[in-house]
Amino acid sequence: MSSLDNETVEKIAKLARLAINKEDASVYAEQLNGILQLVEQMDAVDTKGVLPMAHPQDLKQRLREDKVAESDQRQSFQKIAPKVEAGLYLVPKVIE
Amino acid sequence: MEWETVIGLEIHAQLATKSKIFSAASTAYGAMPNTQACAVDLGFPGVLPVLNSEAVTMATKFGLAIGAEVSKRSVFARKNYFYPDLPKGYQISQFELPIVGIGELEIELENGETKTIGITRAHLEEDAGKSMHEGLGNESGIDLNRAGTPLLEIVSEPDMRSAKEAVAYMKKIHSLVRYLEICDGNMQEGSFRCDANVSVRPKGQKEYGTRAELKNINSFRFVERAINLEVERQIELIEDGGHVAQETRLYDADKNETRSMRSKEEANDYRYFPDPDLLPVELDQAFFDSVKATLPELPDVKKHRFMKSFKLSAYDASVLTSSRELAEYFEAVLVAADNEAKLACNWVNGELAAMLNKENKDISESPVKPEMLGKMIVRIKDGTISGKGAKDCFEGMWLGEGDADEVIKKRDLKQVQDSAAIEKFVDDVIAANPKQVEQFKAGQDKLLGFFVGQVMKESKGKANPAQVNQLVKDKLK
């Protein structure tokens, strides 16, 4: 049976950009392990020959015609942006 | 110790659709920032991506062209990472079930041999936006026009053994996607870019060495340079007792070095899972058949046809078929040139290619149209102009002085074929050079060239050289 330790919980939180308190990590680990155990119950079912499901609905993707149908709405989108300049969205500097 | 280089490439080809892969925003290049980024591209809550049918058709074309199995069922997945130019916090890509499976491509090596490179897969995904770091102080500016542009990521097997092979493979894919008209191949605009996985191992060793991934290389020249630099770096590192780290490295063309991109490292855990916003893509044989019917003649087939029907060498044929436009130009020349294939090939790959190269022009921009070149070749063949006259004629056509016949007239290039006139030139030259005549008669055969040259000069290049040659020989015998 797999189980998550605190270190893994902290790593997942970091990847998801979630700030968590160190002391809370064990609480989350316990909760997440509960979910994993629930999922593991399904291991008991024989799934040989069952096609893995990619979507809960048994439908196929509808395709769209390749046509431009959107107009420029930059102004309305940028109204809610914290900071813009010369049409660009501004964010704290990111550089390699 | 002798080392062997192992290279695999991941090529991103931007598909030439009008609208984005999951939204109806335009993909046109060069628009004002963020004017082509709609709510879907921006990842607003509640939006739903809907797949562009043309992106699916284009990916299918590619799959069929490399003899791969195109999947009847493929699935989109979310690749999770955070970066400001990725509004949703994930990129929609394909992971376990890509649209194109295993295929292969033949490349030509410098020694004239061919080599087959395996293609592991090709999958559809959306591009991210662009970040600008210059002139904005402590901030970066984000333009999301490119976000959601359809990409086909083509992943090769680690089958290449030198930077030159990698370039040959990249050029072949570049040529193929342009033949198929699924990508404009414009590398300056980022429509065609590549990441290279590079490792080295002692020659004869079976296991691969640890690889480094070189990111986002956008020219053929840089691919070759970046790989060679990286190979040198890895060998030096190992020979000094170190180990190659599996990491992402950036090629800096200005400094001509590769360097580690540490920030990318911890993000390498993408936690892929099927995107619940998109259903599985299901395609059937009837669709594959209909796409197959639209495929153009592919570069390799064309090359072999050129070799067979026009009796051209493998080299000539592969140069002529390196782009669809060039091949079509050549065939149009042939129609006008009375099927003088070898001559047409020499002019297209020689003088024309040199002028295009010199003036940095594309074949479609050539001021000498194929019919014009074809008619000039007819004039060479029927003896109206000599090889030298043809060069003048070509120059005239290039400069817009008219078609072949007009330039021949304007520049007075018609060669003199009237035997009596040529004979007169020959007699004059013989009379003017008694010393050389004596030496020639004494056995200095090399002087034949001197006499022919003098006659050609007298005739201002208009005498038929073959005729002159014969006449001089006859007269001095």
Image (tube, coloured by chain):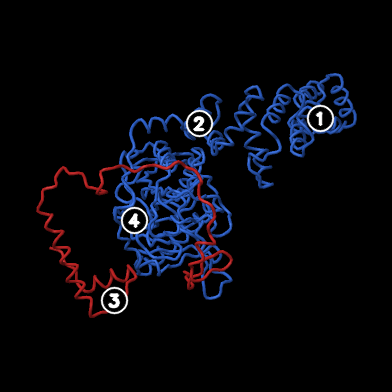
Chain colours: A red, B blue
Which numbered dot is residue B302?
A: 2
In three-dimensional space, the C-alpha distance between marks 3 and 2, rounded to whole angstroms, equals 62 Å
The first of marks 2 and 1 along the sequence is 2
In three-dimensional space, the C-alpha distance between marks 1 and 3, rounded to whole angstroms, equals 86 Å
Q: Are marks 2 and 1 on the same chain?
A: yes
Q: What subunit carries mark 2?
A: B
Circle nearer the viewer, 1 or 3: 3
> Vertically, is B391 above or below B236?
above
Q: Residue furthest bottom?
A: A23
The first of marks 1 and 4 along the sequence is 4
> Vertically, is B276 above or below B133?
above
Question: Which sits in the foreground, B175 or B223?
Answer: B175
In three-dimensional space, the C-alpha distance between marks 2 and 1, rounded to whole angstroms, equals 36 Å
User: Circle 3: is it few (<14), some (14-19), or many (20+) Cα within 10 Å?
Assistant: few
Specify the quadrant that holds the N terminus of chain B: bottom left
Q: Are marks 4 and 3 on the same chain?
A: no
User: Circle 4: is it few (<14), some (14-19), or many (20+) Cα within 10 Å?
Assistant: many
In three-dimensional space, the C-alpha distance between marks 4 and 3, rounded to whole angstroms, equals 24 Å
Q: What subunit carries mark 4?
A: B
Which numbered dot is residue B78?
A: 4
Q: Position of residue B355 (x, y in %)?
A: 69, 42
Residue located at (55% from left, 75% from top):
B137
Q: Which residue is mark 3?
A: A20
> Vertically, is B234 above or below B72?
below
**SS assignment at label 3:** loop
- Type of residue at label 3? Ile
Residue located at (23% from left, 80% from top):
A23
